[in-house]
Image (cartoon, rainbow, N blue to C red):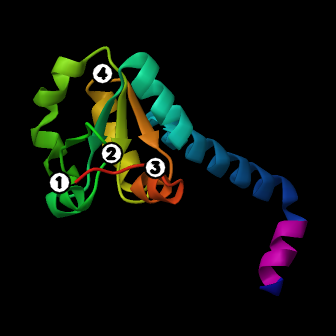
Amino acid sequence: MEQLIEFASNHWILVSLFAGLLILLALDSSAKSGTKLSTAEVTSKVNNENAVLIDIRDANEFKSGHITNAINIPHSQLGNRTDELKSYEGQPLVLVCKDGQRSGMAGKTLQQQGLKVYRLGGGILEWTNQNLPLTK
């Protein structure tokens, strides 16, 4: 650990550039996977912009409780079922997963297909933490 601190202090410009590049990489990756939305922003998009909720959890998780009117397309099947989403072209798509992690990868896939994608930050866990309703 002492060697790392010594290296960083002797080569602070190099370390600063590396840290900056990591931050830019993270921001670029996040932008390519769709904008992260809060529960309030998702509700607003659904109500005002006719956003479509795509729940990418597996069928059993979906059946245990999901956001009203959400469409279940499990992440493992997303690549094979993108044609189903073409009918929603022009509408915002909001991806919902368990905790907000998996929706990033799915968002990249769908944005490459030319779809407008957003992600529910924190996933269904955040939705339930906010005491918002689920249907079964």
Name the residue that disc number 2 marks.
67
In this view, the residue in front, 116 or 15, is: 116
Per the image, label 1 sits on a secondary structure element best described as: helix
The residue at 31%/24% (across/down) is 115
In this picture, residue 74 sits left or right of residue 11? left
Per the image, label 2 sits on a secondary structure element best described as: loop
Q: Amino acid at mark 3?
A: Leu
Name the residue that disc number 4 marks.
114
Measuring from the top left, give residue 17's x and y in whole percent.
75, 49
Name the residue that disc number 3 marks.
132
Of labels 4 and 2, the one closer to you: 2
Q: Quadrant of the C terminus?
A: bottom left
Alpha-carbon neighbours of circle 4 within 10 Å: few (<14), some, or many (≥20)? few
| Gap in angstroms between the C-alphas marked 1 and 2 | 20 Å
N-terminal-most mark, 4 or 2:
2
Of labels 1 and 3, the one closer to you: 3
Quadrant of the rendered image containing residue 28: top right
Answer whether residue 33 is visible to the viewer in this image. Answer: no
On screen, residue 50 above or below 66: above
Instruction: Assess whether mark 3 and mark 2 are in contact (beta carbons under 8 angstroms).
Output: yes
Q: Amino acid at mark 1?
A: Ser
N-terminal-most mark, 4 or 1:
1
| Gap in angstroms between the C-alphas marked 2 and 3 | 9 Å
Measuring from the top left, give residue 35's x and y in whole percent.
50, 34
